[in-house]
Image (spheres, rainbow, N blue to C red):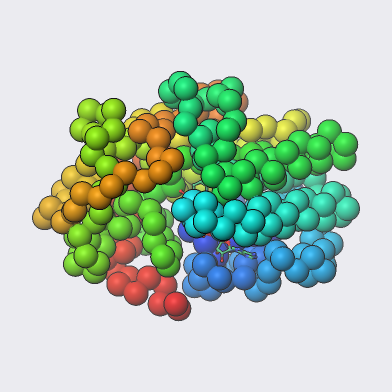
């Protein structure tokens, strides 16, 4: 069987770098396109080729997509600060939405057969039922979510009219890090709860701000669905088989929710001391509970999350962050 060849946009970022690792383990040829605005050169493992370039440059994107053939394009590159997108909506609609659609156009013109998109639970706004399966009404909570929906819609028509098969994976909260310790989460600014709580307990930042303790949840803090980044990577590999037959869209989460307090307590257990925190105001648009209904992904692909213990998820993130006080060290 010939070696598979994949193009991965945003493969120097958190989730993308873990998917690249999973593809390399399967002996694939992997080319990463990343402008390193957020991601890191050192997050692209040896064995993958890094092309430093910007999605906003249509001729560079066209040349790279045209340098196929590719078995699939994985599209991770995006801006993903929800709060920033509420202040600067057109930055997100243009940089994520329009640049993503241009990438799809290039894939259609160069006959790429499969496309896997990092989409988001933010598509579902404040859902009226839980867990959130694929039939819950789409009503993006922010311009960030809307920008992902723009890409999903473009993929719908790319499939209908040009036969480009796609998988839209709506992630809930990606968490943890490579258990082998090669890769981790390094965003600047960091907005994700687990790395923030780890940095607070390690004394690398002031006390963690918890946004709201009055939600309709058992302990009053928001509940989210944390899926280990290696399990997320596995979902990306598994959907490729589906794309031999049809386009798919899946919500990707464990189906298990943890509150902000559950997370800080888990980080405290791993660190051996409590996470210092202060209570802040609730943030506009934060839903009390977001839990994935990922039954369709499980039933169709046999995907089963391997990291089911919260402490184990947190421990992988903790180990990488503790060992890398300056992250990847390039920013
Ligand atoms: N991390 C999560 O919990 C989560 C949840 C839902 C959806 N997502 C989506 O998954 C994807 C990956 O998330 P992540 O946490 O790994 O993000 P990340 O910011 O770590 O990675 C994104 C990568 O894209 C690159 N990039 C950004 N703009 C680019 C451009 N114009 N041209 C080329 N490269 C560019 C960045 O340098 C970075 O390496 C994103 O699309 C994000 O919206 C993530």
**Residue visible at 25% across and 54% down?**
209
**Of the pair 103 and 30, the residue shown nearer to us:** 103
109 left or right of 206 in image: right
**Residue visible at 33% across and 35% down?**
223
Quarter of the rendering containing residue 59: bottom right
Q: Residue 13: in sight, yes or no? A: yes
Q: How many marks?
A: 0
Residue 40, horizontal then vertical, whole percent: 51, 71
Residue 71, horizontal then vertical, whole percent: 75, 50
Residue 70, horizontal then vertical, whole percent: 77, 54
Extreme bottom residue here? Answer: 330
95 left or right of 315 in image: right
Q: Is residue 298 above or below residue 202?
A: above
235 left or right of 1 in image: left
Residue 247, horizontal then vertical, whole percent: 72, 33
**Residue visible at 66% across and 65% down?**
33
**Of the pair 146 and 241, the residue shown nearer to us:** 146
């Amino acid at each position: 069987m010939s070696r598979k060849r994949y193009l991965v946009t945003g493969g120097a970022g958190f989730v993308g770098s873990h998917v690249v690792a999973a593809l390399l383990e399967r002996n694939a040829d992997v080319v990463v396109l990343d402008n390193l605005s957020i991601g890191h050169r050192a997050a692209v493992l040896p064995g993958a080729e890094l092309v430093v370039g910007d999605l906003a440059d249509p001729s560079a994107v066209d040349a790279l997509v045209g340098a196929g053939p590719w078995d699939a394009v994985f599209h991770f590159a995006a801006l993903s600060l929800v709060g920033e997108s509420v202040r600067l909506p057109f930055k997100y609609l243009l940089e994520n939405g329009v640049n993503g659609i241009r990438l799809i156009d290039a894939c259609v013109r160069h006959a790429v057969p499969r496309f896997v998109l990092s989409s988001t639970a933010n598509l579902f706004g404040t859902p009226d039922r839980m867990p959130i399966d694929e039939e819950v009404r789409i009503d993006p909570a922010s311009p960030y979510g809307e920008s992902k929906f723009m890409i999903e819609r473009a993929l719908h028509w790319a499939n209908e009219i040009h036969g480009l098969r796609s998988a839209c994976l709506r992630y809930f909260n990606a968490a943890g890090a490579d258990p082998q310790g090669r890769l981790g989460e390094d965003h600047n600014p960091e907005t994700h709860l687990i790395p923030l709580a780890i940095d607070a307990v390690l004394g690398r930042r002031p006390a963690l701000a918890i946004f709201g303790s009055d939600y309709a949840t058992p302990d009053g803090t928001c509940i989210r669905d944390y899926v280990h980044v290696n399990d997320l990577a596995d979902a990306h590999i598994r959907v490729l088989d589906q794309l031999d037959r049809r386009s798919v869209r899946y919500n990707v989460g464990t189906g298990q929710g943890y509150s902000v307090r559950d997370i800080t307590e888990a980080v405290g257990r791993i660190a051996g001391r409590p996470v210092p925190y202060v209570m802040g105001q609730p943030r506009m648009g934060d839903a009390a509970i977001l839990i994935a209904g990922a039954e369709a992904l499980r039933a169709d692909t046999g995907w089963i999350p391997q990291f089911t213990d919260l402490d184990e998820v947190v421990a992988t993130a903790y180990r990488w962050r503790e060992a890398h006080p300056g992250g990847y060290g390039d920013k």
